[in-house]
Amino acid sequence: MNASGKIKVLIVDDSAVVRNTLSEIISADPRLEVMGTASDPFIAADRIARQVPDVITLDLEMPRMDGLTFLEKIMSQHPIPVVMCSSLTEKGSLSALKAMELGAVEIIAKPRIGTRTFLEEARVRICDTICAAAGARLNRITPMRKVEPKLSADAVLAKPTSHAMMRTTDKVVAVGASTGGTEALRVFLEMLPADSPGIVIVQHMPENFTRAFAERLNTICQVTVKEAENDDTVVRGRALIAPGNRHTLLKRSGARYYVEIKDGPLVSRHRPSVDVLFRSTARYAGANAVGVIMTGMGDDGAQGLLEMKQAGAFTIAQDEASCVVFGMPKEAIKKGGVDKVAPLQGIAGLVLRQCI
């Protein structure tokens, strides 16, 4: 961070158009400052030697050295928060997930031309992601910055005026996560047995990336993991991950729980929004639900978790020590919406005990 308190960002991308577009987006945000750009990792390394940035945005595919190789070098020699900038392709999604395993903090989709609403939403996502990365725990702790929400869940689903339906024998688990959530979700889901209660997850992630993320988790977890599709039934032994750029709501028809996938505005600056999932869970599952809020910047999910608790659900927040960014759980705790604060490694067991 420089003397003005702004977050210093180094943009590394072989495309001049992308470098210029990102520079314009980042420079327009009062929290951020572009300290430089580089067309490949060798130029970037020279810049880092002269001045260390707070955050690096890094292209995956570049000449002379690819982004993954450069990321490995950064993390082994001088860990700096890195946000991967990837194309919305299957190959790009898989490489971006590999980058997360290597230590990248977040993923953003490369900015592209679109409508005014699209460009505004892209600006919000890019700038908020960079701010979240600056507050992430690597080998050092840097201050987090409060980001005001854009819209509440009212924009997608009205607040319930009565209690949810009667209890059933089936429990539903609703989980929300953001920065650092890909690793947190892996740990959580890997610890669950094959007959775990049905789970619906919102992880802040661009469209197309969620499918690759779900497929990756499905290969290593006992539960089945898939990207949610409209009308998918929430059943034991399966975790549904909200598709990027679409809100995901829990619904109920008789004894059957299912998900609705829909468009809508950004809620708490996100789509999908944790608040939208949690509010719908409060309405349609009530005391039949368990809510979990994990690592992430901002306050998405804090109000929704409170509504779940008020509807009779048991609610859990990841503790500060195990969070990459203790933003979302902290805000949920401050609102009084959390029954239990637990370390990441203890959340799965706690969920299972509540679902007996």
Image (cartoon, helix red, strand yellow):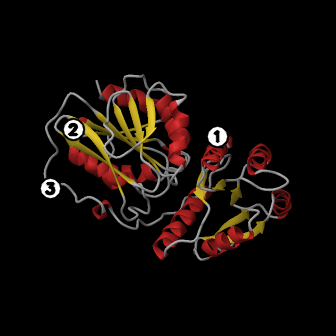
On the question of residue 65 being in view, the answer is yes
Instruction: Report how many numbered discs are placed on residues in the image.
Output: 3
Disc 1 to disc 3, C-alpha distance: 43 Å
N-terminal of the pair, mark 1 or mark 3, is: 1
N-terminal of the pair, mark 2 or mark 3, is: 3
Label 3 packing within 10 angstroms: few (<14), some (14-19), many (20+)? few
Callout 3, which amino acid?
Thr
Examine the rendered structure and indicate whether residue 35 appears above or below residue 53.
below
Instruction: Identify the residue under disc 3.
Output: 161
Secondary structure state at the residue bearing disc 3: loop
**Could you tell whether 68 is left or right of 32 in the image?**
right
Instruction: Identify the residue under disc 2.
Output: 287
Residue at 74 percent across and 66 percent down: it is 15
Examine the rendered structure and indicate whether residue 59 appears above or below residue 338.
below
Callout 2, which amino acid?
Ala
Which quadrant of the rendered structure holds the C terminus?
top left
Examine the rendered structure and indicate whether residue 216 appears above or below residue 221.
below
Secondary structure state at the residue bearing disc 1: helix
Residue at 37 percent across and 26 percent down: it is 196
Examine the rendered structure and indicate whether residue 111 appears above or below residue 305.
below
Callout 1, which amino acid?
Glu
Disc 1 to disc 2, C-alpha distance: 36 Å
Instruction: Identify the residue under disc 1.
Output: 101
Q: Nearer the viewer, residue 187 or 201?
A: 201
